[in-house]
Image: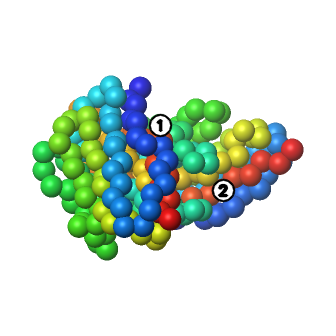
Amino acid sequence: GAVVSQHPSWVICKSGTSVKIECRSLDFQATTMFWYRQFPKQSLMLMATSNEGSKATYEQGVEKDKFLINHASLTLSTLTVTSAHPEDSSFYICSATSEGQVTNEQFFGPGTRLTVL
Amino acid sequence: AQSVTQLDSQVPVFEEAPVELRCNYSSSVSVYLFWYVQYPNQGLQLLLKYLSGSTLVKGINGFEAEFNKSQTSFHLRKPSVHISDTAEYFCAVTERNAGKSTFGDGTTLTVKP
């Protein structure tokens, strides 16, 4: 099956620093990747949609300058949380779809737990 | 626009009892329907999906769901639950010609011994 990995699985950083999270599709080409944020006991909130080779489309209310998304290849997308603050602490999940799919099924990564001190 | 409503935020049930997790949706276009399970500190795992055809869909771990177009529902069922089924369950819809999915708020299934 389609496998998506995320790295790191967890990260702790100091306030004001930047953190990069990687999302990789291991056995398929991901033309589209999605980034979600999930607060404890809550649902997934879509942050942005990224297509390979083009700028990401951010959802309303998501600061594009704070959450930098790059989808430079068909197997890798990165989310950089710039100047992180404690309120950015959350569980970040990516998912991917491929152009060959007709179902728009998303394959999810295992998530990254970010804690900002 | 589309929306998903999971009618129960928490469902406690005893081991080996049947369970139903309810999901209603609204959309102005045709959609695909999904159920995912999430264990603590993990990503989402697909349980089952409805694309077309038979309205009764069977998934992994003994789960099944029935698509009801007239009631715009996609309820998840399992005839006999195990302790290991304790997790968060999300219902989601995706527009057929778009990529974005909309998720419900989740249902916490707690299976008690």
Residue A82: percent from the left, percent from the top?
30, 62
The quarter of the picture where residue A92 lies is bottom left
Looking at the picture, how far across and down is residue A87, in whole percent? Answer: 46, 71
Residue B53 drawn above or below residue A41: above
Earlier-in-chain disc, 2 versus 1:
1
Image point (39%, 56%), residue name: A36
Q: How is the image coloured?
A: rainbow
| Along the viewing direction, whichever of A26 and B20 lies nearer the viewer | A26
Q: Residues within 10 Å of mark 1 (few under 14, many from 20)?
A: few
- Of tags 2 and 1, the one toward the viewer is 2
* Crowd band around label 2 with a 10 angstrom C-alpha radius: few (<14), some (14–19), many (20+): many
Element under disc 1? loop
| Residue situated in front as seen by the camera: A65 or A85 | A85
- Amino acid beneath label 2: Thr
Spatial CA distance of label 2 from label 1 is 28 Å
Given residues B77 and B39, the one toward you in this image is: B39
Q: Residue at x 33, y 36 (%)?
A: A24
Q: Position of residue B14 (x, y in %)?
A: 83, 48
The furthest residue to the right: B113
